[in-house]
Every structure is written in structure tokens, then in C-alpha cells.
């Protein structure tokens, strides 16, 4: 495929676009369109590599009929808000296997397709990365500034007091600035099981600002297999 630099060699002496022949205009428009698509494809591929998403999930792939108790209307209501343009929080609550991670993953993938930098990782992975970091404050700042951050599986790991303080700092810095998604098996009143009461209350307070909490019930999708 011809590149823009190669194209410039042919057209850089032209100061008036109207001087191009119809054939040259058609060629140029086609080439610029191809170049734009290629750049967008590379950008999405880069965002995917950086996101931590290991397996792409899509909203269109979700089987809503298997578990009619999943509040589809509430999920779609959030999807149709300005969550990619305005700071928003979404907490998906429910037992294992009901589709929380699938939907959170799908939302992150949609964000990437629209060009938004996104990070998707579990609480376990986040605490491990923070603990091993050689520059802790820079990493906290990095996660605080990511436009879309999804913290998956909150409730399966109990962080230390120090790790909980780091996680709180991330949530606090993100408040009313960026969008945060959380999946958890714990209702808010039980978050004191993984954080101390003060930290749990403070994190929930931050997530409640511009936030929506949606509870899932029903059978596990894994029982289909």
C-alpha cells in the first residue's frame, strides 16, 4: 500500500487542490481513507495490548435469555449514557458465574473500539502489581488517570491494610475525573470483609458519586457447559 510520504512526493508541489484531475482526486481520497483505517486499526490493536483483556467479550454475545433475572434494562440504560465522555461509575454485584465479568469486559472492549484507553484487571492482579512496583506512587497515579478502569473480582482477595490504602488512593483520585467499573460478589454492606470499615465506606462513597450499583441474581452460566 502506498504511504502518505510516498504520496507527498507526487503532490507536494500542488498548492491548489482544484488543480488535481478527477482521477488524482479519486486516488488521493481512496489512499487517505485507507491510511485512516490502517491508523485506527493500529490504534485499537495498541489499546487492546495495553488493556489487559485476554479474551474479548461483546454485549451482542451475551445470552440474556438463559438468566432472565439479569437486569438487562439497567445495563442498557448505563450503556446509553455518556459514560465514555463523562466520569461515571458502575458496580456489578452478584454471585460467581452470572455474567458480571462478561458484561464488564464487553463494556471495556466497546470503550477501546471508540478509542478510549482502558485497563481491565482483577483485584488480585492490581494488588500484586502495586506490591511489586519499584515506583509505587507513579503506578498509583497511572491507574488513577486511566480513562476507563475496570477492577474485576473484588471480594475474592483480602488486601493487606497497606494495599487497601493504595487501592483507596486510586479510587479517590479517580472520583469525578474518570470512569470506573467494578465487579464483585459482595453487596456493599459486606465490603468491610475485605477492607476495614472506614476504607470500605470511603471507597463506596467515591463510587456512589455519578455511580450506579446493579445487582445480578440467578443461575451460573457455567452450569450450561
Image (cartoon, rainbow, N blue to C red):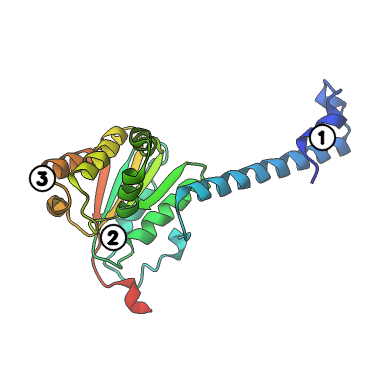
Asked if 17 appears above or below 153 in the picture, the reply is: above
Residue 183 location, quadrant:
bottom left
Front-lying residue, 58 or 153: 153
Mark 2 residue element: loop
Q: Residues within 10 Å of mark 3 (few under 14, many from 20)?
A: few
- State the CA–CA distance, disc 2 to disc 3: 29 Å
Where's residue 185, x and y in %? 23, 60
> Quadrant of the rendered structure where residue 70 is?
bottom left
Q: Which residue is mark 3?
A: 197
Q: Secondary structure at mark 3?
A: helix
Residue 82 percent coordinates (x, y):
39, 40
- Of residues 57 and 53, the one drawn nearer to the viewer in this rendering: 53
Which circle, 1 or 2, is nearer the viewer? 1
Q: Residue at x 24, y 61 (%)?
A: 94
| Residue denoted by label 1 | 7
Q: Residues within 10 Å of mark 2 (few under 14, many from 20)?
A: some
Q: Secondary structure at mark 1?
A: helix
Quarter of the rendering occupied by the C terminus: bottom left
Residue drawn where x is 30% and y is 66% of the image: 98
* Image spot of residue 178 (x, y percent): 36, 36
- In the rendered image, which residue does mark 2 sit on? 71
Q: Earlier in the sequence, mark 2 or mark 3?
A: 2
- Label 1 and label 2: CA atoms lie apart by 52 Å
Amino acid at each position: 500500500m502506498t504511504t502518505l510520504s510516498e504520496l507527498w512526493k507526487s503532490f507536494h508541489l500542488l498548492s491548489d487542490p482544484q488543480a488535481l484531475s478527477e482521477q488524482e482526486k479519486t486516488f488521493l481520497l481512496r489512499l487517505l481513507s485507507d491510511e485512516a483505517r490502517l491508523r485506527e486499526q493500529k490504534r485499537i490493536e495498541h489499546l487492546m495490548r495495553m488493556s489487559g483483556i485476554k479474551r474479548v467479550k461483546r454485549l451482542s454475545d451475551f445470552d440474556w435469555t438463559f438468566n432472565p433475572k439479569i437486569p438487562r434494562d439497567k445495563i442498557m440504560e448505563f450503556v446509553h449514557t455518556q459514560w465514555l465522555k463523562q466520569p461515571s461509575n458502575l458496580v456489578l454485584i452478584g454471585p460467581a458465574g452470572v455474567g458480571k465479568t462478561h458484561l464488564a469486559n464487553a463494556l471495556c472492549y466497546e470503550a477501546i473500539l471508540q478509542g478510549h484507553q482502558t485497563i481491565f484487571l482483577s483485584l488480585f492482579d492490581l494488588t500484586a502489581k502495586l506490591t511489586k512496583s519499584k515506583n509505587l506512587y507513579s503506578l498509583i497515579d497511572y491507574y488513577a488517570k486511566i480513562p476507563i478502569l475496570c477492577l474485576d473480582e473484588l471480594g475474592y482477595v483480602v488486601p493487606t491494610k497497606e494495599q487497601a490504602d493504595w487501592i483507596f488512593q486510586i479510587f479517590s483520585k479517580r472520583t469525578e475525573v474518570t470512569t470506573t467499573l467494578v465487579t464483585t460478589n459482595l453487596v456493599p454492606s459486606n465490603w468491610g470483609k475485605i477492607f476495614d470499615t472506614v476504607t470500605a465506606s470511603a471507597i463506596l462513597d467515591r463510587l456512589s458519586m455519578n455511580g450506579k450499583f446493579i445487582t445480578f441474581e440467578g443461575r451460573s452460566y457455567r452450569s450450561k457447559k
